[in-house]
Image (cartoon, rainbow, N blue to C red):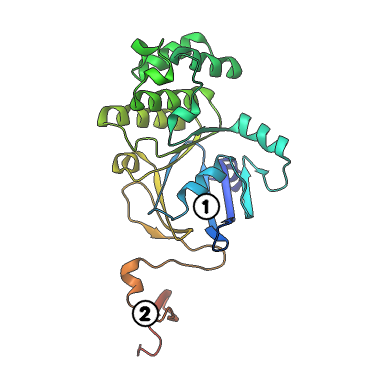
């Protein structure tokens, strides 16, 4: 692949992303310099324990909030200097967002079919596309139901359907299968895979093994930093950012109780030892 082709396939690029929030006890740093790229045609799963920065990262990727520091590029457009109006336009044209509470993505007065027709009118899709999509997500028989008449799983499938129909270059979904049974999860993940196969970049946050198995790669956050990255079920690789920072797994941290390490480069290998330990 040429350099030009590689750059063209990058939908979203994060460079040293920092996010801070005000708190009664002082500022809290949710992201501490995250660096990652997300490519077209792929599904990326962001995972990590509570407080790892997943929600903050997804909100920034979805252009729902701004980073405190660092750079975010969406299809080559740097977002840090955009006005509020420019950011709204970029979000409308380039990013579909599915929140964890899927009802928040739906219009309460519209039926399931009307929800999708509303999206279709803005995206110049056909009514036939709406009916086909309702069939694919198992909501054909519920097309006349409003959100409050749908179950949580049905609302989630409808919200995903609306995001897929939007056909934006980037789709971001927060915990899209968290409370779904196996069949509903299968339907949602199939739609997300279909979305990627047609050229979108899909990013989800998840704790769900089913979703991680469906992803092309898994990015694990810890303490606001990208700790590891793996391709699907492949071996997880430790991430090293542009400042040379590396997060060791918790089992390795036990070897360095003082938080310091002796670093040696020997025969093309990097070796870490507790200070004072003989080679």
Q: At 55% from the left edge and 58% from the top edge, which residue is drawn?
A: 23
Residue designated by label 1: 36
Q: Horizontal and vertical percent for residue 227? A: 43, 60
Camera-side residue of 15 and 116: 116
Image-quadrant location for residue 258: bottom left
In the image, is 232 to the left or to the right of 38? Answer: left
In this view of the protein, can residue 128 be seen by the observer?
A: yes
Mark 2 Cα shell of 10 Å, populated few (<14), some (14-19), many (≥20) = few
Q: Position of residue 52 (x, y in %)?
A: 44, 55
Spatial distance from mark 2 to mark 1, Cα to Cα?
A: 29 Å
Q: Kindly check if marks 2 and 1 are in contact, taking CB atoms under 8 A apart as contact.
A: no
Instruction: Tell me the quarter of the image containing the C terminus.
Output: bottom left
Residue placed under numbered mark 2 in the picture: 257
- Check disc 1: other Cα within 10 Å, few if <14, some if 14-19, many if 20+: some
Q: Of 16 and 159, which appears nearest the observer?
A: 159
Residue 157 left/right relative to 82: left
Which dot, 2 or 1, sits closer to the camera? 2
Side of 125 where 221 appears, left or right: left
Q: Write down the quadrant of residue 16 in the picture.
A: bottom right
In the rendered structure, which disc, 2 or 1, sits on the residue that comes first in sequence?
1
Q: Residue at x 39, y 28 (%)?
A: 156
**Residue closest to the eye, 8 or 194:** 194
């Amino acid at each position: 692949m040429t350099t030009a082709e590689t750059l063209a396939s990058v939908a979203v690029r994060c460079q040293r992303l920092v996010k801070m929030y005000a708190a009664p006890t002082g500022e809290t740093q949710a992201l501490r310099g995250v660096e990652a790229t997300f490519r077209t045609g792929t599904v990326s799963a962001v995972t990590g324990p509570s407080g790892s920065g997943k929600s903050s990262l997804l909100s920034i990727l979805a252009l729902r909030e701004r980073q405190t520091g660092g750079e975010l590029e969406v299809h080559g457009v740097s977002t840090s200097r955009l006005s509020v109006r420019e950011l709204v336009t970029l979000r409308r044209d380039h990013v579909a967002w599915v929140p964890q509470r899927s009802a928040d993505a739906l219009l309460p007065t519209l039926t399931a079919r009307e929800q999708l027709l509303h999206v279709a009118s803005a995206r110049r899709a056909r009514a036939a596309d709406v009916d086909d999509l309702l069939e694919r997500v198992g909501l054909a028989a519920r097309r006349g139901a409003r959100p409050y008449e749908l179950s949580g799983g049905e609302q989630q499938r409808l919200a995903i359907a609306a995001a897929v129909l939007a056909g934006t270059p980037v789709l971001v979904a927060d915990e899209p299968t968290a409370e779904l049974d196996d069949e509903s999860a299968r339907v949602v993940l199939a739609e997300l895979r279909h979305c990627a196969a047609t050229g979108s970049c899909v990013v989800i946050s998840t704790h769900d093994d089913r979703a991680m198995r469906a992803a092309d790669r898994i990015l694990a956050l810890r303490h606001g930093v990208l700790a590891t990255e793996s391709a699907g079920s492949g071996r997880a690789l430790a991430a090293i950012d542009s400042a040379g920072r590396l997060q060791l797994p918790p089992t390795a941290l036990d070897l360095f109780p003082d938080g310091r390490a002796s670093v040696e480069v020997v025969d093309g290998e990097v070796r870490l030892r507790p200070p004072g330990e003989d080679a």
